[in-house]
Image: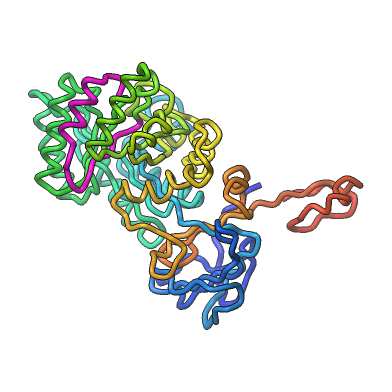
Amino acid sequence: MPDSQPWQPDDHAADADGAAGGPETAAPAGLVLCGARLTDGRVVDVRLGGGRIEAVGTAGSLAATGPRLDLRGYLLLPAPAEPHTHSDTALTADGAPGPASHRPEDIRRRATEAALLQLGHGATALRSHVRIGDVRGLAPLEAVLQARRSLRGLADLTPVAVPRLLTGIAGAGNLAMLRDAVKMGVGAVGGCPDLDPDPAGYAEAVLEVAAEQGCPVDLHTDSDDPARLGRLAAMAGGLRPGVSLGPCAGLSRLPPQAAARAADQLAAAGVTVICLPQGGCCGAEGRGTAPVRLLRAAGVRVAAGSGALRDLTNPVGRGDPLEAAYLLASQHGLPAAEAYEAVSSAARTAMGLPGVRVEAGFPAELLAVRGEQLPEVLSLAYSRVVVHRGRVVARTSAVREYCDSETVVALDLPRQGRTDPGSCGGP
């Protein structure tokens, strides 16, 4: 069973399933990841320093003056990023009956725990949609900003301010709060136009604030109304630093020709679609997933997020980017490489983050998963090692063993750990 526990740094080489390199105040000098396999089949050593990849060489070729981490048997990948989560409501399905607590201290605790869970899955950068306005004002956002500060050095958490209403008398106060939220340090402005009495007016207000402040836009929409979506795409076209829409599941329910026209409009506007293969979120009215292959064929950048993490919308949401990639491959027919791209490079681009490749000079944002090929990793993503800013920040180890039998012995299956003779293996 997976086991994630704190561990102490070790200056000596260690197997990735054992203790090696834990969270510290600064990245270790010259950390070398040894014997990792890349997606092109090469087995390499990777030296990290200063938060970046310093060198990549054949296995055994890089000198190590500092700590080393043995990654034999692991596939080394650019770390995924989480472009769509809800920190303020995460983990609320597990609590006592009745409405979830919205006290700032409870939101801060949930946001921190949720980010750490997703970090353990491999997401070193997260974008979280946070409800502002109404009776709670800006308190939930301040709580998530406090969580962001507490996570510094472990993961990068970026809030998105999400007001419920923005038009008419009822929305005037929320519009002022949205501007205040930008001053507080949110990474993007967003919301759900579909829930406002004037969806076009809502979208226009968000885009106006974004243009004023020079910040990205990330809007919730089901996209089941082609005319409304077309107007939104037209308004968003050319806005910099960019506009993302999600989860856009309603596009899958449109007639094929209408969906194709909408995809062309989104592509022409340069809009990114963030789909949620693992389920909906609190801003989505319907279930399902955006038509990923149709959108990609039209030239739309498609990223994949997790959505709800064990809240009332999806009580079993895992917040696992590798599961999102698995579902894109298994349910939507994407090749494994394209499915992983949706949760890594495409997600990072949607979030305005620099790209990552396992090459010298790139940010040391990496994920090592036990396995030799990407399809295997998406299918059986058990043991993982997460690197953020050049240091190991999370480790999950899984042990699978079988009882002794002639069948198991004949297959010579790999084992981790030890069991008593004649007994069934356990963690």
Side of 106 relative to 423 (left or right)? left
Q: Image height check: is 387 above or below 281?
A: below
Q: Nearer the viewer, residue 353 or 269?
A: 269
The x, y position of residue 96, in whole percent, is 46, 30
User: Can residue 230 be found in the magenta stretch?
Assistant: yes
Residue depicted at 36% across the width and 57% down the height: 355
Side of 122 relative to 151 (left or right)? right
The x, y position of residue 319, in whole percent, is 46, 41
Which stretch appears magenta? 223-247
Residue depicted at 32% across the width and 35% down the height: 102
Q: Nearer the viewer, residue 299 or 282?
A: 299
Q: Image height check: is 251 above or below 58?
A: above
Q: Quadrant of residue 295?
A: top left
The x, y position of residue 413, in whole percent, is 79, 52
Q: Image height check: is 397 above or below 206?
A: below
Residue depicted at 31% across the width and 19% down the height: 258
User: Can residue 89 be found in the magenta stretch?
Assistant: no
